[in-house]
Image (spheres, rainbow, N blue to C red):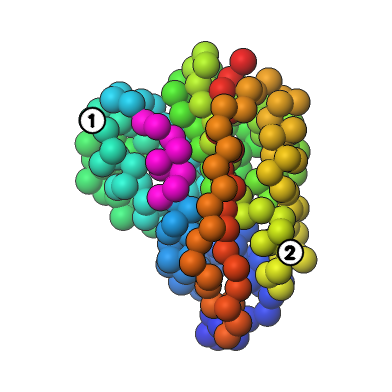
Amino acid sequence: MEINKIDNKTIAEQLRRPNGEFATKVGEIMNEGNRQINLDVIDALNLSVGDEVLEIGMGNGFFVKEILSKKKELKYTGCDFSKEMVEQSIQLNATFVASGQANFYLNDGVKLPFEKETYDKVFTINTLYFWKNEALTLHEIWNVLKPKGQLTIAIRPKSVMQLYPFTEYGFKMFDKEEVIRLLEQNNFKVTEVVENEEPSQDFGGVEMRVANCIVSAQKI
């Protein structure tokens, strides 16, 4: 079955957790469709030499090289709950894995398998829609962040997401204010909000608006 012939419910399930026969293709599609949001987030991280960075939901790890090229002595950890995405990330970043500069874990984000106060920066792109318990996930992130560490959450805002036909299946949509409120209610101080328009993208032969919202906050 071709990827462009599957129904919107299946598309939604694959975007949440790429698996099975579609996993590789879905990973490639996400790389292309999410290129700009990834690059915008990498800029928003304001990386410093020697930072320990954790990404929750890295897909196939295509953008890891972009992160590690920003500063010297960076260390990257990625976790995802798609077995296929973890395997592909390890393959795609084999050199970084061999050198100890990158590590990848199969994990659902509910209970992070890392020591407290390990990371300077934690970020996640297009995963907030799928969190079952936002407060619990934010508590886990808070625990693994160093004092005054930075969390960056990037989403497609509700005004854009509601235009896409697949988002009616299992997507919880947010606007900027809701993300800010969520962070402030869970021991984070919002430090920066960036909103970007992106080039339109083709969804089933229809050109649709694309935008991103990036919210950065400090652990308090």
Can you give x and y, in whole percent of width and height, for residue 199 in the image? 49, 67
Residue 113 in view of the camera: no
Q: Is residue 127 above or below residue 51?
A: below
Residue 20 visible in image: yes
Say which quadrant the N terminus sits in.
Answer: bottom right
Query: x%, y% of residue 215?
Result: 58, 38
197 and 44: which is toward the camera: 197
67 within the magenta span: no
Of 30 and 181, nearer the camera is 181
Looking at the picture, does residue 68 appear above or below residue 211?
above
In the picture of the structure, the residue carrying the numbered disc 2 is 162
Q: Is residue 8 left or right of residue 206?
A: right
Secondary element at image label 1: loop
The quadrant where residue 138 appears: top right
Q: At 54% across and 58% down in the image, what residue appears? A: 197
Which residue is painted at 55% across and 42% down in the image? 194
Identify the residue shown where x is 58% and y is 78%.
207
Where is residue 98? Give x, y as percent.
24, 40
Q: Quadrant of residue 214?
A: top right
Q: Which residues are magenta?
A: 39-47
* Quadrant position of the C terminus in the picture: top right
| SS for callout 2 | loop
The residue that mark 1 highlights is 72
Look at label 1 and name its amino acid: Lys
The kind of secondary structure the magenta stretch mainly shows is helix
* Crowd class of label 1 (few under 14; some 14 to 19; many from 20; radius 10 Å): few
Location of residue 71 by image quarter? top left
Check disc 2: other Cα within 10 Å, few if <14, some if 14-19, many if 20+.
Answer: some
